[in-house]
Image (cartoon, grey):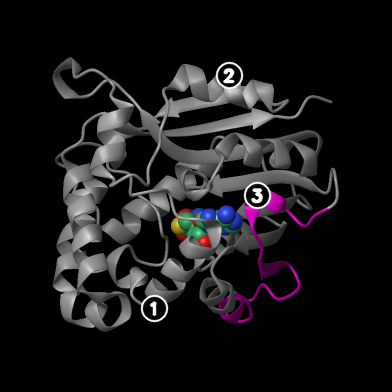
Amino acid sequence: MTKPTPTEIGHGYDAFADLLDQIWGENLHHGYWDDTFDETSLEDATNRLTDKLSGLLTIEPGDRLLDLGCGIGEPAIKLATAHDIEVVGVSISERQVQRANDRVASAGLAGRLSFQLADAMELPFPDESFDIVWALESLHHMPDRWHVLRQVARVLRPGGRVAIGDFLLVSGADGQEPDAARVREVSKGVLSIVGIDEYLSNIRAAGLVPEAIEDVSKHTQPSWGKAAVRFEALRDQALPHIGAEQFELTLSRFHGFSEESTLGYVLLTARKPV
Ligand code: SAH
């Protein structure tokens, strides 16, 4: 199976847009748990991951932040509520953009928050127009992460920062060797990941200087199993939207990922030099 195009990803999220929050909650990303005894709910744990990533940044009042792959806007709303900043979010899913925009007024953030349909591969923004770019669990969908990072460097002002949450190839439990090919197979061809050295060298090649790097793999790993349980419970609701084949494929991915200990997760930040 080949990696879906941005348009196909967008249609996939459109079909899923009103179901996904019953799986992940309003954050469409992994949760963070302290350890295996931590009984925090998936919803609270996903908020924690947002906090972990924003905690790696210094966010100044008046900053302009681009949320790359904004989902239904929950992380953007959280960031704009906690900090006096302006946020522009982009997603490749029309339905997500609509839902995210519908939430702005009730969050009391009209005028500071907006969402639009755009492909991160071709960002429709001028050079040096943002202080911060935020990409939480979205780069793995894009046809070429490193091309997107060059776009990120272009739209950041000198001294601006990028915050990334992404999948990472790691040594697994019991020293299992990192194996990108196996992860790709488990994902049925859609997920390509690299180790930290390759990730960092591509960040540098895009003209950015890595700053904070946190391997949170152990803390996020429980997400897949928890999502699989919720997804399975949604079978009857999901089938009319996505069909049986897609349902089984997605479920088998969630189960496969929950057992793949070399599929890790990294939080990192980088700066565009002045
Ligand atoms: N960051 C959000 C959503 C993560 S889900 C959250 O944490 O809640 C992945 C997101 O990436 C979706 O919104 C999807 O539409 C977006 N995405 C995937 N490929 C994209 C592309 N090529 N351009 C813009 N957004 C994209």
**Some atom of ligand 1 lies within 8 Å of the CB belonging to the residue at label 3:** yes
- Secondary element at image label 3: helix
Crowding at label 2, few (<14), some or many (≥20) Cα neighbours within 10 Å?
some
Between marks 3 and 1, how big is the CA–CA gap? Answer: 25 Å
Between marks 2 and 3, how big is the CA–CA gap? Answer: 20 Å
Q: Quadrant of residue 91?
A: bottom right
Q: Mark 3 points at which residue?
A: 121
Q: Mark 1 points at which residue?
A: 18
Q: In this view, does 18 lie to the left or right of 108?
A: left
Q: Return the disc, 3 or 1, that comes first in the chain's sequence.
A: 1
Which disc is residue 95 wearing? Answer: none
**x, y percentage for residue 164?**
54, 39
Amino acid bearing label 3: Met
Q: Nearer the viewer, residue 89 or 180?
A: 180
Q: In this orientation, does residue 199 appear?
A: yes
**x, y percentage for residue 168?**
39, 31
Amino acid bearing label 1: Asp
Amino acid bearing label 2: Ser
Which disc is residue 201 wearing? Answer: 2
Q: Return the disc, 2 or 3, that comes first in the chain's sequence.
A: 3
Please state, as top left, top right, bottom left or bottom right, where the C terminus lies in the image: top right
